[in-house]
Amino acid sequence: MSLVTVPGKIRLCGTHAVLVMSEGSLHQAVCIAGDALPSSSGDMIQGLMARLDLYEGIAGRKFADGELAYDGRVWITSSDIDAFSLQERH
């Protein structure tokens, strides 16, 4: 599955970010935990936008595998980023 972030649908919510992603008519809320957010001191939204390919790849894989949280959202943590990066190298 290839989820893509809907333009203008990135929000910071306390310690995490919420993105709305879509594929065709399907829309999926994706939460990025604080430990997976960019650690730059600049604009957080720009930091998120710079890493959208990474977040979209992880979200698409997790959604396709049925890895949804109790609230129906896909949650991305730093361990997901580590695992995805390892997988991409092999």
Image: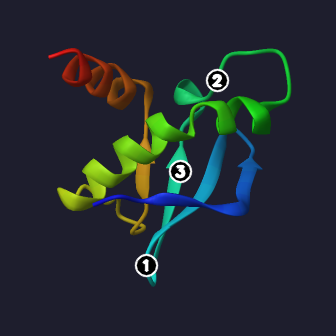
Is 89 placed above or below 28 here? above
Task: Please state the horizontal and vertical placement of residue 65, each as a whole percent of the image.
Answer: 17, 56
Task: Please state the horizontal and vertical placement of residue 58, each as a whole percent of the image.
Answer: 36, 42
Q: Which of marks 1 and 3 is nearer the N terminus?
A: 1
Q: Mark 3 points at which residue?
A: 31
* Total numbered badges shown on the rendered structure: 3
Q: Residue flagged by tag 1: what amino acid is it?
A: Gly
Viewer-side label of 2, 1:
1
Residue under the image location 42 percent in, 59 percent down: 3
Q: Residue flagged by tag 3: what amino acid is it?
A: Cys
Which quarter of the rendering shows the N terminus?
bottom left
Task: Please state the horizontal and vertical placement of residue 7, each as a whole percent of the image.
Answer: 70, 61
Q: Distance between the residues labelled 1 and 3?
A: 20 Å
The answer to whether marks 2 and 1 mark residues whose Cβ atoms lie closer than 8 Å is no
Q: Tell whether 65 sits left or right of 44.
A: left
Instruction: Describe the element under mark 2 as helix, strand or loop.
Output: loop
Q: Which colour scheme is used?
A: rainbow
Task: Please state the horizontal and vertical placement of residue 36, each as a whole percent of the image.
Answer: 52, 28
Is 56 placed above or below 71 here? above
Q: Name the residue under label 1.
A: 24
Q: Earlier in the sequence, mark 2 or mark 1?
A: 1
Instruction: Describe the element under mark 1 as helix, strand or loop.
Output: loop
- Between residues 16 and 47, which one lies in front from this camera angle? 47
Residue 38: image tag: 2
Q: Residue flagged by tag 2: what amino acid is it?
A: Pro
Viewer-side label of 3, 2:
2
Q: Residues within 10 Å of mark 1 (few under 14, many from 20)?
A: few
Tell me the quarter of the picture where residue 80 sits.
top left
